[in-house]
Amino acid sequence: MTTTLILGGARSGKSAYAEKLALESGKEVVYIATARAGDGEMAVRIKTHRSSRPGSWTTIEEPLLLGDAILRCSEPDTLVLVDCLTLWLSNLIFSADQDFPEVGVINLPDIFYEQCDALLAALPQAPGDVIMVSNEVGMGIVPYGALSRCFTDEAGRLNQAVAKACERALFIVAGMPLTIKGQAC
């Protein structure tokens, strides 16, 4: 069993690289999609992603209970591909249908912390390979607004925790992988 985190910026090629690794594995692939179609533009993005995946892959849509989904789908001869952790974080943040202030402290819903803990607990228990895709959002300017700053902070914390839990971590820049932990692939 190998766990891999693939990080990169928007349109860096991280999803394509993760899919390439999944195809090359020769294993049965279960693709866990975390995105929700909240608007027409996002629906088009989801449709494009869906149509680019091989028909032989099983797709599971799981916007909230990611750790449970990984444990449910992981088998020794299966590779689970999760795309992506930052969309999943957004789903958790907005799952409680609460208002957030423009300035001040952001109080995230309990499900946010519960599910982040569940994901980190699931990774060492998964009997098969797991590849997770996540955006690196902390390399730009400090975002405007309390919620945007909170999201950036929490995404950074999650990426650090997941990278620590994984055997391998890659950073994708312009479609090219840089190995930051473990062996190159």
Image (tube, helix red, strand yellow):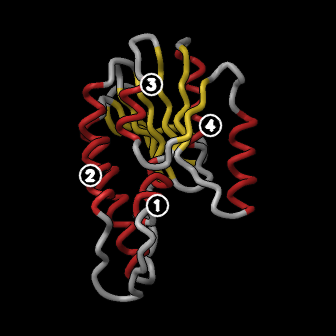
Q: Name the side, left or right, on which 170 lies relative to 107.
A: right
At horizontal 29% and vertical 74% (from top left) the residue drawn is 107
Q: Which residue is mark 4?
A: 16
| The N terminus - image quarter | top left
Q: Which residue is mark 3?
A: 73
Q: Is residue 122 above or below residue 83?
A: above
**Do residues under tags 1 and 2 come within 8 Å of each other at their CB atoms?**
no
Q: Residues within 10 Å of mark 4 (few under 14, many from 20)?
A: some
Q: Nearer the viewer, mark 3 or mark 1?
A: 3
Q: Residues within 10 Å of mark 2 (few under 14, many from 20)?
A: few
Q: Amino acid at mark 1?
A: Ser
Q: Amino acid at mark 3?
A: Cys
**Do residues under tags 3 and 1 come within 8 Å of each other at their CB atoms?**
no
Q: Which badge, 1 or 2, is on the more N-terminal residue?
A: 1
Label 3 vs label 1: CA separation?
A: 23 Å
Q: Residues within 10 Å of mark 3 (few under 14, many from 20)?
A: some
Q: Which residue is mark 1?
A: 90
Mark carried by residue 122: none
Q: Amino acid at mark 4?
A: Ala
Tell which of 67 and 178 is nearer to you.
67
Label 1 vs label 2: CA separation?
A: 14 Å
Q: Which badge, 4 or 2, is on the more N-terminal residue?
A: 4
Q: Which residue is mark 2?
A: 114
Label 4 vs label 2: CA separation?
A: 30 Å
Q: Position of residue 4 (x, y in %)?
A: 39, 32
Q: Which badge, 3 or 1, is on the more N-terminal residue?
A: 3
Q: Amino acid at mark 2?
A: Glu
**Do residues under tags 4 and 2 come within 8 Å of each other at their CB atoms?**
no
Label 2 vs label 3: CA separation?
A: 20 Å
Q: Nearer the viewer, mark 1 or mark 2?
A: 2
Label 4 vs label 1: CA separation?
A: 22 Å
